[in-house]
Amino acid sequence: NAGVTQTPKFQVLKTGQSMTLQCAQDMNHEYMSWYRQDPGMGLRLIHYSVGAGITDQGEVPNGYNVSRSTTEDFPLRLLSAAPSQTSVYFCASSYSKYYSGANVLTFGAGSRLTVL
Amino acid sequence: GQQLNQSPQSMFIQEGEDVSMNCTSSSIFNTWLWYKQDPGEGPVLLIALYKAGELTSNGRLTAQFGITRKDSFLNISASIPSDVGIYFCAGRSGGGADGLTFGKGTHLIIQP
């Protein structure tokens, strides 16, 4: 049981390049989400999904696209990277969108992205 | 939008000391969570709180859901070196799937 797996762990891009951050979970979780973490800013929600085929925007969605074709995978796409997207990105999942009892958000180890 | 104020931003303490940190919200929450993040890793859940007034312990950690539903605190007793890290509070106010609001974190540094 690997939990939430993110790849790559580190990536350097030039401004204008595109890339996809991968996220996979093997816990059969319905809910998946992407956060970015910046110094002094805490974690901010980019996009989330409550199930395959369903996605929605979070607090800071601009410049990012997501899709959810399977329950297991939730990739985050940067179509044209900008220096402001330099950050650490975390994927997280939970059994459902309702937090109660043992159902809480489990995070991946993060992907550190630098845009030059 | 919702705002979470977490304090202190950082703490420099001696090993063996007790630690206290808190979060306050501009709106009422129905869930409070406390996470710890080690360097190079993702946040890991420490304690989850679902009822106003709830007091929950996890080993040397104790957290409480404030009675006003706008605040929560985390205490760590008898700190040890492995307690070093960033502690985040997170709260949720509704039943929607719009995720959690996170505090900016408390950076705990322990001096031997």
Image (cartoon, helix red, strand yellow):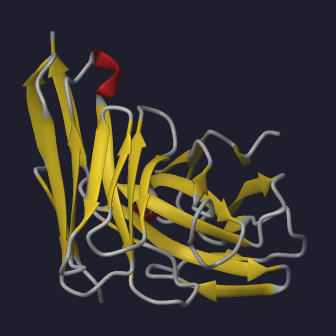
Residue A103 position in % (x across, y down) = 63, 64
Q: Write down the quadrant of residue A17 in the picture.
A: bottom right
Q: Nearer the viewer, residue A8 or B17?
A: B17
The residue located at (60%, 79%) in the rendering is A98
Q: Going by the picture, which residue comes out furthest to the right?
A: A70
Residue B67 relative to residue B81: left or right? left
Counting from the top left corner in percent of width and height, residue A77 is at 69, 68
User: Residue A35: x and y, percent?
Assistant: 51, 64
**Where on the picture, by quarter, is residue B34?**
bottom left
Q: Quadrant of the N terminus of chain B?
A: bottom left
Q: Look at the picture and state if B41 lies above or below B92.
A: above
**Considering only vertical position in the picture, is A98 above or below B53?**
below
Q: Nearer the viewer, residue A13 or A45?
A: A45
Asked whether A79 or A106 is in front, the reply is: A106
Identify the residue at horizontal 74%, vertical 45% (top origin). A3
Describe residue B90's horizontal placement relative to residue B103 as left or right.
right
The answer to whether residue B97 is left or right of residue B71 is right
- Quarter the C terminus of chain B occupies: top left
Q: Position of residue B83 (x, y in %)?
A: 31, 27
Q: How many marks?
A: 0
Residue toward you, B75 or B41 = B75
**Which picture quadrant has residue B59?**
top left
Q: Looking at the picture, does residue B79 appear above or below residue A91?
A: above
Q: Residue at x 20, y 76 (%)?
A: B67
